[in-house]
Amino acid sequence: MYQVDFVPPSGSVEHECESISMGDWIVFRCPICKDYFRSINLITGEMKVGGSKESISHSGKHYSPEFAEELAQDNSSKAKIN
Ligand SMILES: [Zn+2]
């Protein structure tokens, strides 16, 4: 299971993001904030982010076939990607 946790800003609004796989990368995009994205490299852990606002906490879920076995055992794969 892949999970990321970030400290959310206080008093923030939370947006649920959508994720897609791009090779070794998972890319989260917010349907509300058109310029927001967060990319995470599953191999290196490298992270890229753009369009982030301090007042908005972004979270997202990502499922992929590689993690299906682990997801079957643990359903708490919600990722905090503020
Ligand atoms: Zn947003």
Image (cartoon, rainbow, N blue to C red):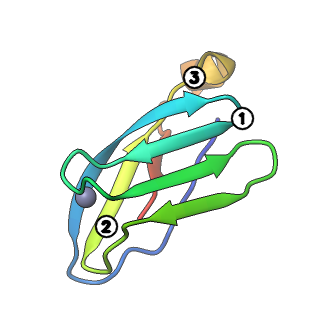
Q: Amino acid at mark 2?
A: Ser
Q: Residue at x 45, y 65 (%)?
A: 50
Real-space Cα distance between discs 3 and 1?
Answer: 11 Å
Question: Dot 2 corresponds to which residue?
Answer: 57
Q: Secondary structure at mark 1?
A: loop
Q: Which quarter is ligand 1 in? A: bottom left
Label 2: how many Cα within 10 Å (few below 14, some 14–19, many 20+): many
Q: Amino acid at mark 1?
A: Asp
- Seen from this angle, which residue lies furthest bottom? 10
Real-space Cα distance between discs 2 and 1?
Answer: 24 Å
Q: Amino acid at mark 3?
A: Ser
Real-space Cα distance between discs 3 and 2?
Answer: 23 Å
Q: Secondary structure at mark 3?
A: loop
Q: Position of residue 52 (x, y in %)?
A: 37, 70
Residue 63 placement, left or right of 58: right
Residue 69 placement, left or right of 56: right
Q: Position of residue 38 (x, y in %)?
A: 49, 55
Q: Residue at x 29, y 49 (%)?
A: 30
Closer mark to the observer between disc 3 and disc 1:
1
- Seen from this angle, which residue lies furthest front? 35
Q: Secondary structure at mark 2?
A: strand
**First along the sequence among labels 3 and 2:** 2
Of residues 41 and 59, which is closer to you in this image? 41
Q: Which mark is residue 24?
A: 1
Label 3: how many Cα within 10 Å (few below 14, some 14–19, many 20+): few
**First along the sequence among labels 3 and 1:** 1
Question: Dot 3 corresponds to which residue?
Answer: 64
Circles 2 and 1: CB atoms closer than 8 Å = no
Quadrant housing residue 74:
top right
Q: Is residue 37 above or below residue 72?
A: below
Label 1: how many Cα within 10 Å (few below 14, some 14–19, many 20+): few
Quadrant housing residue 4:
bottom right
